[in-house]
Image (cartoon, rainbow, N blue to C red):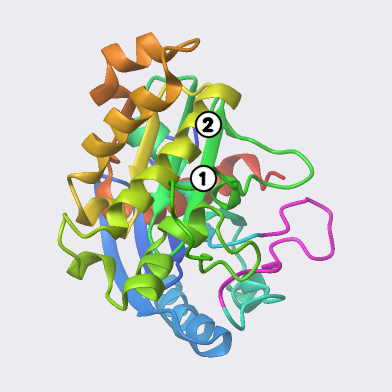
Amino acid sequence: MPFANPAPLVAGVELGGTKCLCMLASGPDDICAEVRVATRGPAETLTAVGAVLAQWHTQHAFRALGVASFGPLDLELGSPDYGLILGTPKPGWGGVAPLTHWRALGVPVAIDTDVNAAALAEGLWGAARGLGSWVYVTVGTGIGVGTMIGGRALRGLGHSEAGHQRVPRLAGASWPGSCPFHGDCVEGLASGTAIQARTGFAAEALATDHPVWAEVVHALTGLFHNLVVTVVPERIVVGGGVALGHSELLPRIRRALDVSLEGYAHAGRIARRAEEFLVPPGLGERAGALGAIALAGRALHEGPRG
């Protein structure tokens, strides 16, 4: 487990596409402080976050720092670029190394993707407690997927970027998508950025019967179908501003996933417990920041992991 008992005070930063959430806590039931910082350019954002952390460290001497960041990231231990943000759809952030701004704090530091961190927190304290395998999907500014097997994030050549899968398009759909790398990948069709680019309105401003939701549901269903038949999770937890802001999305996707799987393999088991298989996060909007707190606890007691 990431924390000893009693748990020490640590800091976490969720570095998100539109906002950063800084948290000082020892766990979900002991949150001492939270500060939101708008995500602007790298220098302005990381300096503002650094000021919050420096103040907290002076006042409270927190023991470790966890960073849950949008990616892709270099997470190979021993790499000279460990923690570097690689090619990213977020303009101006490719090649930025957040950890270099905060190492002067002199505490153990761990970094992972925002979705891997959220998945970790949901397994410890939220909707995936007691499971051996689960997936956390954020549908927000972008679409990220954190896959946990045996309580550890899936790793290979790098970390998963399953939100950039290409899936079959809805019949008759021709909009090219908004992803600067892949156009009509799932993120390019169903993220908050894609919805705004296509409609001219933020997702939260759109009525539930707006036609764009049909393609969003179709793209997300394709993503979840692929996850079911590849990593076979026991549960898929779906968070992010778009998903949490439209409560009707999950029921629509549950029905569409049942149709998509067509009874194959584990489809019957999923259909019988659909409301337990595809669920909102138990930690709500705090899943990513609490994931950063969990990473900090792991850094303190286990050291960083690749």
The x, y position of residue 134, in whole percent, is 46, 28
The circle drawn on residue 135 is none
Rate crowding at label 2 as few (under 14), some (14 to 19) or many (20 or more) other CA atoms within 10 Å. Answer: some
Residue shown at the point (59%, 64%) measured from the top left: 183
Residue shown at the point (41%, 32%) measured from the top left: 123
- The reply to whether residue 3 is in sight is no
For residue 88, what is the image quadrant? bottom right
For residue 137, what is the image quadrant? top left
Q: Secondary structure at mark 2?
A: helix
Q: From which residue to which does the magenta span run?
A: 73-90
Provide the residue designation for mark 1. 145
Q: Secondary structure at mark 1?
A: strand
Q: Magenta segment: does it hold 87?
A: yes
- Determine whether 131 is above or below 87 in the image: above
The x, y position of residue 28, in whole percent, is 29, 45
The x, y position of residue 34, in whole percent, is 29, 67
Mark nearest the camera among 2 and 1 is: 2
Whether pointer 2 and pointer 1 mark residues with C-beta atoms closer than 8 Å, the reply is yes
Specify whether 27 is left or right of 66: left
Q: Residue furthest front?
A: 172
Q: Overall secondary structure of the magenta stretch?
A: loop
Specify whether 196 is left or right of 295: left
Across the whole image, how many numbered discs are drawn on residues?
2
For residue 101, what is the image quadrant? bottom right
Q: CA distance from mark 2 to mark 1?
A: 10 Å
Amino acid type of the residue that numbered disc 1 sits on in the rendered structure: Val
Location of the C terminus (image quadrant): top right
Provide the residue designation for mark 2. 227
